[in-house]
Image (tube, rainbow, N blue to C red):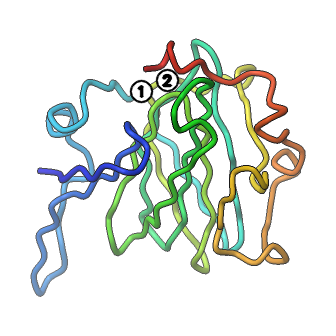
């Protein structure tokens, strides 16, 4: 059984599992196709990924384009992150707006990010293990991204800029206004 919490952007959803705890610890279902489809709708996840990162790492803001677009269901199994989804669907009422949610091993929250969004996260704890399900396979030739610190987005990553750790690739992404290939709201809605 899961609880779905809507965010400011329709379609981006916080998922809270029902956690059973006692003196021994806790138990919860991390994934149930049946419960997810009843609460959110039909999504067929085909790939699971995991990354481990240290404090200050920001990964993103990434997406896959065209027929390789992905919905994601993300969670943290160790540590804490600030997870961010940015609406990059041209023509959307929320184009350029974002949702930021803290995910942690303690709160067990998950975030569902539908197709048409750029995604990234910042590690707030000493280390974090981040897991995500994707409904389409990774296709390197379809990668897209926008700059993590685009002033037009106004994202507070909750990390001082001097402490931010980026990959070489994540340093050179375009601003949202300059991104050549995004999504069309009419096609994703």
Picture coordinates of residue 124, whole percent (x, y):
59, 75
Which residue is depicted at the point 11% across and 87% down? 23
Q: Nearer the viewer, mark 2 or mark 1?
A: 2
Name the residue nearer the viewer: 26 or 69: 69
Q: Which image quarter: residue 61? A: top right
Tell me the quarter of the picture where residue 163 sits. bottom right
- Quarter-wise, where is residue 172 in the image? top right
- Identified at 21% across, 57% down, the residue is 17
C-beta proximity under 8 Å, tags 2 and 1: yes
Mark 1: which secondary structure? loop
SS class of the residue under badge 2? loop
Sequence-wise first label, 2 or 1: 1
Question: How far is the residue under mark 2 from the one under mark 1?
Answer: 6 Å
Say which residue label 2 marks. Answer: 136
Instruction: Answer with left or right where residue 162 lies relative to residue 66.
Output: right
Residue 25 vertical placement versus 108 (above, below): below
Q: Residue at x 14, y 33 (%)?
A: 38
Q: Is residue 74 found left or right of 83 in the rendered image?
A: left
Residue drawn at the location 27% of the way across and 53% of the way down: 5
Location of mark 1 (residue): 46
The answer to which of 84 and 95 lies nearer the viewer is 95
Left or right: 55 in relation to 34: right
Local crowd size for mark 1, using a 10 Å CA cut-off: few (<14), some (14–19), many (≥20): few
Q: Residues within 10 Å of mark 2 (few under 14, many from 20)?
A: some
Q: Is residue 85 above or below residue 114?
A: below
- Looking at this rendering, what residue extends furthest in the bottom direction? 23
């Amino acid at each position: 059984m899961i609880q779905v919490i809507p965010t400011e952007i329709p379609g981006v959803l916080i998922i809270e599992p029902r956690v059973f705890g006692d003196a021994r610890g806790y138990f919860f279902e991390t994934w149930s196709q049946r419960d997810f489809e009843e609460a959110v709708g039909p999504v067929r996840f085909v790939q699971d990924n995991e990354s481990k990162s240290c404090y200050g790492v920001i990964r993103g803001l990434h997406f896959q384009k065209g027929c390789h677009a992905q919905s994601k269901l993300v969670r943290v199994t160790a540590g804490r992150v600030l997870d961010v989804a940015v609406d990059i669907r041209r023509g959307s009422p929320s184009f350029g707006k974002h949702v930021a949610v803290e995910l942690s091993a303690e709160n067990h929250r998950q975030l569902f990010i539908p197709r048409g969004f750029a995604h990234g996260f910042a590690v707030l704890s000493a280390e974090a293990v981040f897991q995500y399900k994707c409904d389409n396979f990774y296709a390197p030739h379809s990668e897209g991204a926008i700059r993590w610190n685009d002033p037009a987005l106004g994202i507070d990553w909750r990390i001082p800029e001097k402490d931010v750790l980026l990959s070489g690739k994540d340093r050179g992404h375009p601003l949202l206004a300059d991104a050549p290939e995004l999504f069309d709201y009419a096609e994703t809605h």
